Amino acid sequence: MQSIILAHEVDFAGWREAARRLALDGVPPEQAHFSVGEPDDLFAQGESEPAALQAGGSFSVSRALIELAQTVIQAREPERFDLLYGLVWRAHRGERRITELVTDPGVQRAIRLAQSVRRDTHKMRAFLRFREVCEEDGTRYVAWFEPDHYIVEANADFFVRRFATMVFSILTPYRSVHWTGAELRFAPGADPAQVPDDDALERYWRAYFAAIFNPARLKISAMTSEMPKKYWRNLPEAAAIPELIRTAASRTETMLETKPMPPDDQTPPRRRVAAPKPVADPIQPGSLAALAEAAAGCRRCALWEPATQVVFGEGPEHARMMMVGEQPGDQEDLAGRPFVGPAGQLLDRAIVEAGIDRREVYVTNAVKHFKFEPRGKRRIHAKPDLTEIAACSGWLVEERRAVRPALLVMLGATAARAVLGRTVTISRERSRPMALPDQFGSNAQGLVTVHPSYLLRLPDEDAKRREYAAFVADLKQARALLEDAVPA
Ligand code: URA
């Protein structure tokens, strides 16, 4: 039996290297066992990897499997490393598309763990509340959270992006994270007593919550399923809930009984002054990293507010091909990365079949925040309108300036509208290479095709097969166009 000791609970690099070495050495899953070393070692040793994990040889598994593993590794399940190694072993032995075997017990188990991690991530992002603490050298915001899984490390960047200008600490039972405004540090878990229990911020939250609480629309079951009671004690506004529930019925009656005041009794209506239109600062050109950072605070339209985070484009700084989609979906919004959900998986498959390497493509969206309608627990995709596409267009322009791709592939009508600035009928204009206006001294070409989610929505299998083949043919054409284009 080979025993592998990982440096910490989310030591993905250590696990990946060990899994690679074991698979190359032909060690079957039943002869390998992963566990995690003493937590103290982590902070004593820094991030160094165990020496035994050096391996040579060639080895690759699908991107989908790597992404699944990155999520599953955060699950509070001691067997997860072994489970994942089992999948890697099978992928290495020829089951290349193992993540698509959704009825396979091992794959199913991994998918369930990944879903649970994603739910926990969503709760952390939605229910974490900071309290203000005055320190000698300024104010620190401190939050206590009890995640179900080991999700703190993977989410630290999200909070840094969202609260970049605050000095904050997030304390959890297994790990703490401290942001100084410039540097991120991880430390061992903490005690909830380290979090102050009342302050101005808390009072503000309570007042805010009480003000938005409409007693006539009280749905206790919906409230407790969306915001499970477990999280209430860390939410300042939750202290107001029992009292608000208790008085809801009488407050509703009062609301119904209160007759509208006759016009004479009313205080004169205030003269409405048109609110000045917010003037958005022009977006400064910059590197992709600088643009992504600036976009994290984008308020150019209202979509930022209900969304979890901005989903900026990703890919090489000087990719020759750029693919533009519509907007992030539910999964992209939670992951903070474009095209990782069902449409993204379909796109990945088609990209591979077309002989393109996604790692060489810059992938982005016309609109960078998820637009949705809440329906029960679900968030249903809503199409961005013209003002939202226009508000976001500056980011796409700057992405194009930074990357200067030789070819832009527009996936669907919203992407085509954002790039071409006009309404495009996909059936008329798809598959026809076009010269794009020379914006940045580069002669980029454009190619319009369908959006992968269109393929997912097709009702019958024949149409699905036919349309998928046409989509792959478009991507093959994109590849050929690039091969013919003169490198910049
Ligand atoms: N659809 C898109 O257009 N973009 C994504 O990132 C995901 C789904």
Image (tube, helix red, strand yellow):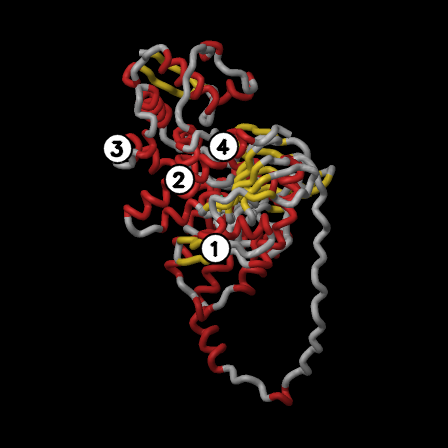
Quadrant, the C terminus:
top right
How far apart are labels 3 and 4 at the CA level? Answer: 37 Å
- SS class of the residue under badge 2? helix
**Mark before the other along the chain sequence, 3 or 4:** 3
- Say what amino acid the circle numbered 3 marks: Asp
> How many badges with numbers are in the image?
4
Pointer 1 local density, CA inside 10 Å: few below 14, some 14–19, many at least 20: some
- Say what amino acid the circle numbered 2 marks: Leu
- SS class of the residue under badge 1? strand
Task: Name the residue that disc number 2 marks.
Answer: 346
Question: Closest to the observer: 436 or 305?
Answer: 436
How far apart are labels 4 and 2 at the CA level? Answer: 21 Å
Residue 372: image tag? 1
Pointer 4 local density, CA inside 10 Å: few below 14, some 14–19, many at least 20: few
How far apart are labels 3 and 1 at the CA level? Answer: 32 Å
* Residue at point 45%, 47% (across, down): 451
Instruction: Establish if 61 lies above or below 302.
Output: above
Q: Are marks 3 and 4 in contact (CB under 8 Å)?
A: no
Percent across and percent down for residue 295 are 63, 44
Task: Name the residue that disc number 3 marks.
Answer: 104
How far apart are labels 1 and 2 at the CA level? Answer: 21 Å
Q: Are marks 1 and 2 in contact (CB under 8 Å)?
A: no
Task: Name the residue that disc number 4 marks.
Answer: 480
Instruction: Establish if 442 lies above or below 58.
Output: below
* Residue at point 60%, 37% (across, down): 169
**Mark before the other along the chain sequence, 3 or 1:** 3
Residue 21: image tag? none
Quadrant, the N terminus:
top left
